């Protein structure tokens, strides 16, 4: 095994134990399973059964139902009985927090229970306590005494268990010793896993969930390594980004966290947690699973070529040559030159405004545009005011435009620059102060004329770039735009970048990703898992997304319409900035940590989230949590600056960080009170 996965350069599923959940087998060589969670009141049997059926019909293979107390756990029997009467036998999962008694009841009824080691025995009071080794050992004995009965019940009834750590709900005990870290998440789960193994109980799945994809990915990698080192085997893994939110942001954050792990063959079951009705999570899960089913077929050329133009990318990338290069992956030293368990951005030299300590840039792709007008510039963050004759520049404004073989015939905003093909730049552009050339590797090797400040080179990482690498060591004004025509493009680009680090080449890198998927969700997944996966490891100084809107079709499942040429540039630009925001490398907007709702939710979460977003979406860099209930809210929103949490019927409690500042506010005035809280803390600005 190579580090935390089977292979760093080719796609191969991580080998895990098989676990039986009802009539479903998870792990091993079995397919990645799709699941979701109901949002209805568990005591409303009819509503929960109806929603569960909608989820099953959409494609859910497991359905989780909240059981916060004994009465909900007992009612799982009625729900299961009604589903069986109607011919539905998909395994049910009881979601347990704080209440061991409820878990023990549920384990005798349904096929799986999920426990959170952060609050199953411990209580979180946000207290810092110094434990001696003896005191810590006593706490482990206390956990063992309280947790073992559930283990024995599950073992006797053939019930599966998920030990699900949440970053935001680590116990005070874990926080005191390990801090708010991925290591703390891993140890929290391992304590429970060791107890279960001590009882010879192995029907276990684990998860490491966080609203921060960076923390989530590091925690899973550490968990796999720890299990392999300690037990010599790995239990199945459930993947999910908790409190991801809604819309495209929720999909992007989930795709970065889940997709980055699946790129390396990690994950046996997934859930995409969106602040939407649960059946709408399923199509996104399906797109993720389908993407990695395709990865299992090696040595095939992709259905499309990433070819910006006949001049801008190497002419040698014919289909015949691609088929040939797919037969044998490049031979690389698989020793990583960076740690996959902690974030540290690759050290590069600054070229113009790229690399070094600059935030990652965004390149807007206008390759397919016939012309470029002021209205087109509007779509990438620059709005022209005819009255003042000035440009208004948004926080999510692209840094460069790629025009291919076209010339921009208008006065650009001061911060916007453009890139064109080398031949056009060399032969046509007279004022080259804001225009920079894009070379193919072949052109750059033979070019006599180059820009004195900044030169872009398109580099296919699947090819032999030995001659170019030698030249890169001698140039300090070069930025390379890397791409791969293989299905596992992220792995290929990662290993190429690792090779640069091994050879001491420090030129900045722009991650270029083209998607020809035919629906929006599938494109978001491809962009996010490829570019986001690299950025999570600190490997990237810019992002360049491409697609062809004419290939899009209407998505009848979600009702999301296809892209057109009029909104495609805005879609790509928004996606680029959302990816950078999700990996915390460039903050351009407000971030919302919003739970997907469940039977504990005490208000209309979707409506409330939309209302809060509408009045706060101009507060760049602020993290606001919208949580459905007091059970998970205070812990799982720990990454937020401010929190809006349901605390009773029609009542809201407001938080600043982890501290309660206003309790039991009437829901009708709670949004206004949130705004007042932001004003009191000096973070509010008028829209």
Image (spheres, rainbow, N blue to C red):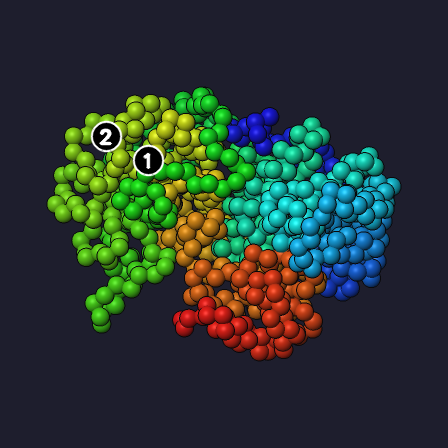
The answer to whether marks 1 and 2 mark residues whose Cβ atoms lie closer than 8 Å is no
In the picture, the disc for residue 22 is none
What residue sits 40% from the left and 22% below the top? 324
Dot 2 falls on a residue whose secondary structure is helix
Q: Disc 2 designates what residue?
A: 443
Q: Position of residue 455 (x, y in %)?
A: 25, 38
Camera-side residue of 484 and 222: 222
Camera-side residue of 539 and 241: 539
Whichever of labels 1 and 2 marks the residue nearer the N terminus, that label is 2
Q: Disc 1 designates what residue?
A: 507
Q: Residues within 10 Å of mark 2 (few under 14, many from 20)?
A: some
Quarter-wise, where is residue 396 in the image?
bottom left
In this image, 490 relative to 147: left or right?
A: left
Q: Position of residue 279 (x, y in %)?
A: 62, 55
Q: Residues within 10 Å of mark 1 (few under 14, many from 20)?
A: many
What residue sits 66% from the left and 30% below the top? 228
Q: Position of residue 358 (x, y in %)?
A: 35, 47
Q: Is residue 327 above or below residue 262?
A: above
Dot 1 falls on a residue whose secondary structure is loop
In front: mark 1 or mark 2?
1
Residue projecting furthest to the left: 430
What residue sits 32% from the left and 44% below the top? 354
What residue sits 69% from the left and 31% below the top? 230
């Amino acid at each position: 095994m190579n580090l935390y996965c089977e292979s760093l350069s080719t796609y191969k599923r991580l080998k895990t134990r098989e676990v039986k959940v009802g009539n479903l087998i998870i792990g091993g060589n079995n397919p990645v399973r799709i699941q979701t969670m109901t949002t209805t009141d568990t005591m409303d049997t009819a509503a929960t059964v109806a929603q569960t059926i909608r989820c099953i019909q959409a494609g859910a293979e497991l359905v989780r139902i909240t059981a916060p107390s004994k009465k909900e756990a007992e009612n799982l029997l009625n729900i299961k009985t009604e589903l069986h009467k109607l011919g539905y036998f998909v395994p049910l999962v009881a979601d347990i927090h704080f209440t061991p008694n409820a878990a023990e009841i549920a384990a005798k009824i349904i096929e799986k229970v999920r426990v959170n080691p952060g609050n199953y025995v411990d209580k979180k009071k946000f207290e810092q306590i110094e434990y001696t080794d003896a005191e810590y050992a006593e706490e482990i004995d206390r956990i063992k005494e309280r947790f073992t009965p559930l283990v024995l019940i599950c073992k006797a009834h053939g019930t599966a268990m998920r030990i699900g750590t949440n970053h935001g709900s680590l116990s005070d005990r874990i926080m005191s010793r390990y801090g708010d870290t991925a290591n703390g998440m891993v140890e929290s789960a391992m304590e429970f896993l060791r107890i279960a193994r001590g009882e010879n109980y192995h029907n276990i799945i684990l998860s490491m969930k966080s609203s921060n994809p960076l923390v989530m990915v590091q925690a899973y990698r550490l968990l796999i390594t720890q299990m392999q080192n300690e037990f010599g085997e790995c239990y199945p893994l459930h993947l999910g980004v908790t409190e991801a939110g809604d819309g495209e942001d929720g999909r992007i954050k989930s795709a970065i966290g889940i997709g980055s792990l699946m790129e390396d063959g990690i994950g046996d079951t997934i859930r995409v947690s969106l602040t939407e009705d649960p059946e709408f999570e399923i199509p996104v899960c399906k797109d993720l699973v389908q993407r990695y089913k395709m990865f299992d077929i090696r040595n095939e050329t992709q259905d499309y070529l990433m070819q910006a133009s006949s001049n801008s990318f190497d002419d040698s990338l014919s289909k015949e040559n691609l088929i040939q290069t797919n037969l044998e992956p490049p031979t690389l030293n698989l020793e990583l030159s960076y740690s996959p368990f902690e974030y540290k951005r690759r050290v590069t030299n600054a070229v113009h405004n790229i690399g070094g300590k600059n935030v990652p840039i965004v390149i807007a792709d206008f390759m397919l545009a016939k012309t470029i007008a002021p209205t087109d510039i509007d779509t990438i963050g620059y709005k022209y005011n005819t009255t003042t004759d000035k440009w208004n520049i948004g926080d999510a404004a692209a840094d460069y435009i790629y025009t291919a073989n076209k010339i921009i015939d208008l006065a650009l905003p001061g911060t916007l620059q453009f890139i064109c093909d080398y031949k056009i730049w060399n032969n046509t552009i007279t004022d080259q102060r804001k225009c920079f050339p894009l070379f193919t590797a072949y052109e750059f090797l033979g070019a006599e004329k180059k820009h004195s400040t900044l030169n872009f080179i398109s580099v296919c990482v699947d090819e032999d770039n030995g001659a170019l690498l030698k030249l890169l060591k001698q140039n300090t004004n070069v930025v390379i735009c890397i791409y791969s025509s293989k299905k596992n493009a992220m792995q290929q680009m990662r290993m190429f970048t690792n090779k640069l680090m091994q050879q001491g080449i420090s030129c900045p890198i722009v991650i270029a990703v083209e998607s020809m998927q035919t629906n929006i969700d599938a494109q978001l997944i491809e962009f996010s898992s490829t570019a986001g996966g690299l950025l999570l490891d600190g490997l990237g100084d810019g992002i360049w997304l491409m697609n062809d809107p004419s290939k899009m079709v209407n998505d009848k499942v979600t009702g999301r319409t296809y892209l057109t040429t009029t909104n495609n540039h805005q879609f790509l630009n928004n996606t680029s900035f959302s990816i950078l925001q999700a990996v915390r490398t460039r903050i351009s907007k407000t971030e919302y940590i919003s739970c997907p709702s469940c039977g504990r939710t005490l208000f209309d979460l979707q409506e409330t989230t939309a209302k809060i977003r509408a009045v706060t979406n101009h507060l760049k860099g602020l993290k606001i949590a919208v949580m459905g209930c007091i059970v998970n809210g205070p812990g799982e929103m720990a990454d937020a600056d401010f929190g809006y949490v349901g605390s009773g019927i029609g009542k809201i409690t407001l938080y600043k960080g982890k501290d309660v500042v206003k309790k039991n506010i009437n829901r009708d005035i709670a949004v206004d009170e949130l705004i007042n809280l932001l004003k009191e803390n000096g973070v509010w600005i008028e829209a």
